[in-house]
Image: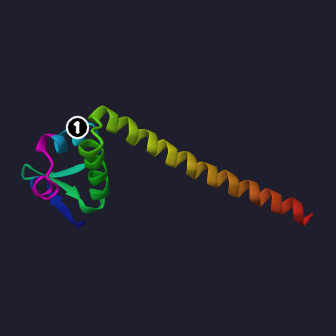
Amino acid sequence: MSERISREELVRIYNIEVTFFDELVDYGLLHVQTEDNIRYLMYEDLPELEKFANWYYDLEINLPGLEVIHNMLKKLEALKRRNRELMNKLSAINNEYEDI
C-alpha cells in the first residue's frame, strides 16, 4: 500500500486550517482516501497541497482562484505535451523528406 498521511497530521505539520483542507477536497483539488472516518492524503499528492497552501496563505488567492489557476496549469501542461508530440511528428516527416 502507498504511503499516506492523515488530515489531522497535515493540519498540524503544515499549520493549515482543517476547513482549508476540506475545501480543497470539496473543490476536487485534492483526492483523499477515507478509512474509519479518517481522511488520508497520499504522500505523492503532498506537493499539490503545498502549492495550494502557498498560493492561499502567502499569495492570498481564494479557493475559486486556486481552482481556476490549477485548471489553467493542467491545460497548459496538456498543450505543451501535445505541442511536443506534434513537433516530433513534424521532425520525423522532415527527416523522411530529407532522405529522399
- Image spot of residue 1 (x, y percent): 22, 67
Q: Is residue 72 above or below residue 37?
A: above
Measuring 13% from the left and 40% from the top, which residue is drawn there? 19
Q: Say what secondary structure mark 1 lies in.
A: helix
Which image quadrant: the C terminus? bottom right
Give the residue furthest to the left. 36
Circle 1: residue type? Asp
Chief SS of the magenta region: helix
In reply to whether residue 14 is colored magenta, the answer given is yes
In reply to whether residue 87 is colored magenta, the answer given is no
Measuring 27% from the left and 54% from the top, which residue is drawn there? 50
What are the residue bounds of the magenta stretch? Answer: 9-19
- Image spot of residue 43 (x, y percent): 25, 62
Q: Is residue 30 above or below residue 6?
A: above
Q: Residues within 10 Å of mark 1 (few under 14, many from 20)?
A: few
Q: Which residue is mark 1?
A: 26
